[in-house]
Amino acid sequence: MAGVDIGGTKISAGLVTGDGTLERIVTVPTPAAEGPAAVLAAAAGAVRGLDHDVLAVGIGSAGVIDPVGGLVRSATDALPGWAGTDLRGGLRDHLGVPVAVDNDVHAHALGEAWTGAAAGRRTVLLVAVGTGVGGSLLVDGRVHHGARAAAGHVGHIAATPAAGLPCTCGGTGHVEAVSSGPALLTAYLRRGGTPGTGHLSRVAAAAGAGDELAAEVLADGARALGQVIGGLANVLDPDVVLIGGGVSRCGDAWWHPLLEAVEGELLPPLRGLPVHPGALGPAAAVIGAARLGWAVAA
Ligand SMILES: [Zn+2]
């Protein structure tokens, strides 16, 4: 089985066994600027690069994906023209096998629930914090897509510290505007952080080395997000909350305030709710996509 993760900068295809073991992975750059046909061809090329016959292919893609119709409903500027693409039909034409499709964050959650940090758990909330803030809810092991396949947009919940700040969605005041990777980096520089700090990992390293401003900036973003996650947990009562994405690798200066803020929001029956990093790393979406593929394999 092949699982494919299509993102704005790279496409990964993995060969995954029936028990969820990742045997091989091929990663290629996403030719996003060349348009959807080039992206589909690159994804098919990555699958062929696995050099193995597959029964079916599962795809996890950036964007709002309609898993029933197989289409991309909407997407950000990271993949120009991606909205409206027949993802399932396009890949099926290239590869000649059944194809299952879903959003990449949903695939990530399915991977962790199959063989990762949420293995065996029924109700799972995944929050992915990177360039944006995304999420996925699994209920009884299945993705909750919502009525418009748009469920999971954790970043677009109002948060007090974000009041008045523009959000990537066109709205204002959403938690993504203070807790995404770019938001943290911007806040660090605006508050007087060392100019030339071009990457969040350097802010995280500075926080770890005792830079108080860096630690405060990470803590402020983490607290805002932690409050939102705690509120969501009160609504959804998951077995476990998993946190993934690049920002989740910022160390204790980010994790401690996040966990404290989550716990501070929880209703008494939820206290002690496990909140963990994922276990599968960047391969989680590939493994979860393969699980979708197994469901449609002939
Ligand atoms: Zn927003």
Image (cartoon, rainbow, N blue to C red):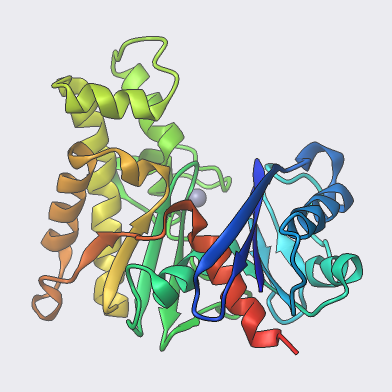
Q: From where the camera sits, is residue 163 visible?
A: no
> 223 or 55, which is in the foreground?
55
**Residue under the image location 41 percent in, 69 percent down:** 112
Relative placement, left or right, of 130 versus 209 is right
View extreme (top): residue:
195
Residue 5: give x, y in percent of width and height.
63, 58
Residue 159: give x, y in percent of width and height.
32, 50
> 117 or 150, which is in the foreground?
117
Q: Quadrant of the C terminus?
A: bottom right
Relative placement, left or right, of 86 versus 261 is right
> 49 or 194, which is in the foreground?
49
Q: Quadrant of the N terminus?
A: bottom right
Asked if 220 appears above or below 230 in the picture, the reply is above
> 137 or 186, which is in the foreground?
137
Q: From where the camera sits, is residue 38 visible?
A: yes
**Residue under the image location 65 percent in, 44 percent down:** 10
Asked if 30 appears above or below 108 in the picture, the reply is above
Asked if 4 appears above or below 180 in the picture, the reply is below
- Residue 48: image quadrant is bottom right
Relative placement, left or right, of 270 versus 245 is left
Residue 192: give x, y in percent of width and height.
29, 13
**Residue under the image location 85 percent in, 53 percent down:** 41
Residue 139: give x, y in percent of width and height.
42, 84
Asked if 70 appears above or below 29 in the picture, the reply is below
Relative placement, left or right, of 130 versus 60 is left
**Residue under the image location 31 percent in, 25 percent down:** 203
